Image (cartoon, rainbow, N blue to C red):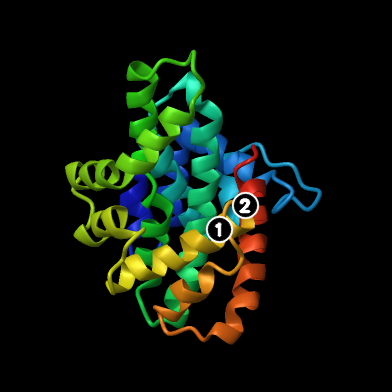
Amino acid sequence: EALRIARASELDLDAAVRLAENDPPLAARVLAVANSALYARGARHVSPRRAITHIGGSAVRDVLYQAAYTSMIINVPRFAAEIARDFVHGVATAALSRALARVAAADTEDAFLAGLLHDLGRARCWKLVATRVPSAGGDGDALAVVEELHAAAGHALVNSWRLPGEIADVCLHHHQPGGRKLPSIVSAADVLTHVAEGRADPRAPADALAAIDIDECLTDEWLKRGVAELERARLMTSG
């Protein structure tokens, strides 16, 4: 339901309020965002209706997308930190995907959702390795399994939920987009987020941005945007 409301061409704030008032995890997410350093500005909100009114339509849509994402995540205590990091990574990549799509004349909301869900398969993989890979020898082997299998796992999950085929395509191809437009956009956003996290070479985004016709001279500007969106994602998901 959160995904249906978020994907509507005209966001129905009353529907979002009704859903939040009957969905405690969504209400908690909305209140956490409204009371975060990013939005609070000295106010303290205790009702979903006031929180939704305060943060506004664009942020409400993003929170609904995030709620849909978190409802798909499997709780795996052994890898809770990794799953939380993947979620923040997805939120930042989603925002960057939307911004890049605007420049690349692509659908911004499809890009946002694709960016948010591009690594969704990692959660399923973390569950798989938690049950099949011993922890005694460290988690290096577990990480290798996740890196190898998450794209196919995400593709299968998104297809099983009957989300748009373009989203499944991004899950499968975001590391090797092969000229496909939406996967190429998310791939560039993904690399920018990895750089902001300190997990990729700052020179890495240039080729990914060039693939969507963004000039190399703008790479530094997008790197700064990546840092800003990662910080925003951390603030937005810290509640």
Instruction: Give the amino acid type for the residue marked by disc 2 in the picture.
Output: Glu
Q: Is residue 56 visible?
A: no
Q: Residues within 10 Å of mark 2 (few under 14, many from 20)?
A: some
Q: Residues within 10 Å of mark 1 (few under 14, many from 20)?
A: many
Q: Is residue 214 above or below residue 125?
A: below
- Secondary element under disc 1, as helix, strand or loop, is helix
Q: Which residue in the rendered view is the most extreme toward the front?
A: 137
| Labels 1 & 2 near each other (Cβ < 8 A) | yes
Pinpoint residue 95: horizontal percent, then vertical percent: 52, 62
- At 27% from the left edge and 41% from the top edge, which residue is drawn? 153
Pinpoint residue 85: horizontal percent, then vertical percent: 55, 40
Pinpoint residue 45: horizontal percent, then vertical percent: 68, 41
Q: Quadrant of the C terminus?
A: top right
> Foreground residue, 202 or 238?
202
- Image mark for residue 86: none
Q: Is residue 157 left or right of residue 5?
A: left
> Foreground residue, 13 or 158?
158
Q: Indicate the quadrant where residue 81 lies.
A: top right
- At 53% from the left edge and 67% from the top edge, which residue is drawn? 204
Residue named by callout 2: 197
Q: Is residue 24 left or right of residue 217?
A: left
